[in-house]
Image (cartoon, grey):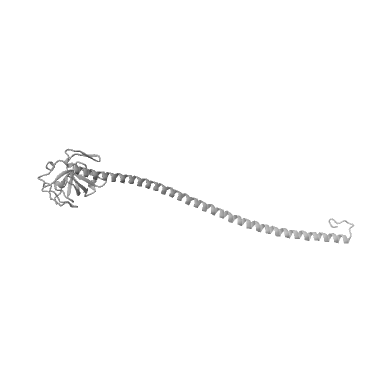
Amino acid sequence: KGKGIHPTAGTGELQARYKLTENKLDETKKQLALTEKNLESARNQVEALTQELERERRSKQEIISNSQQLQSIIQEREAKQRTLEEELNRAQRDIKRLQAKLKNVEEEKAELEKKLKDMELSQSEPEEKIELGKIVVGQQKPASEQKIKGPVKKPTKQPASPEPQRTEPSSLLEGKVLVVNKDYSFVVIDLGRQHGVNLNDLFSVYHNEKYIGDVKVERVHDSMSAAGFVSSQIKEKISQGDKVVLKLQ
């Protein structure tokens, strides 16, 4: 007895049912094959999507890594920029300070030159005091009262010329420092043309009777002279009132 077949069913009916079942079986096989094909396609798509997701994940990680590197580079450049801006601001402040100092020094130089001329012109006025910067200098004593170890040749009238003729002192000259200008590296001494001082004369300088170096005459007036430092060491040792003695050559 076949399952699901009525005992009274005839051969024709059995064949029809068999045919129908066979058709259903074929249809089921086709659907199964189609489903397997779709499943395989789905698997392929899933695998492709998985690979794509992996590439995207790697790309994202690379982007994140590059972003971190770029961020690090940006931060480093920002730090360098801030440092450069600070250095620029500091340099600008230094420039302003140096410009102000230069202006003050130039004004001081002009004032010293003016007062040197005033001192020279005021030699004929008795006991007149002239303020030179922060130093008050009294009227120079006559040549006969200078600290000179011997007679001094009297000044003679020189013809007008850009550079006065050189005169030789008859003996060793000794004087003192009136003004010290360390910014321009020169001093003013109380010996001049009328004492026999000439351009390029060398004077030894003594601080508290101790030799500290030499100065060289660069500008000569009647009763005083301006002399530059021969060595840089003397610049920090020389003071107003130090003794100067002419070096015979």
Q: Is residue 107 visible?
A: yes
Q: Residue at x 70, y 58 (%)?
A: 38
Total numbered circles? 0
Q: Residue furthest left?
A: 151
In the image: residue 26, left or right of residue 70: right
Q: Which sits in the foreground, 22 or 184?
A: 184
* Rendered residue at 73%/59% (across/down): 34
Q: Quadrant of residue 239?
A: top left
Q: Quadrant of the N terminus?
A: bottom right
* Residue 169 position in % (x across, y down): 12, 48
Residue 47 x, y percent position in the rendering: 64, 57
Place residue 15 in its image quadrant: bottom right
Task: Return the x and y of residue 78 as percentages of the image width and height.
Answer: 46, 49
Farthest front residue in view: 160
Closest to the observer: 147 or 155? 155
Instruction: Please tell me whether residue 124 is drawn above or below residue 45 in the rendered image.
Output: above
Which residue is depicted at the point 35% across and 45% down? 96
Q: Is residue 36 left or right of residue 4?
A: left
Residue at screen point 56% across, 55% down: 59
Residue 63 x, y percent position in the rendering: 54, 53
Q: Out of 189 and 62, give the one closest to the viewer.
A: 189
Relative to 201, say whether 30 is above or below: below
Q: Can residue 238 be seen here?
A: no
Above or below, 41 against 170 in this view is below
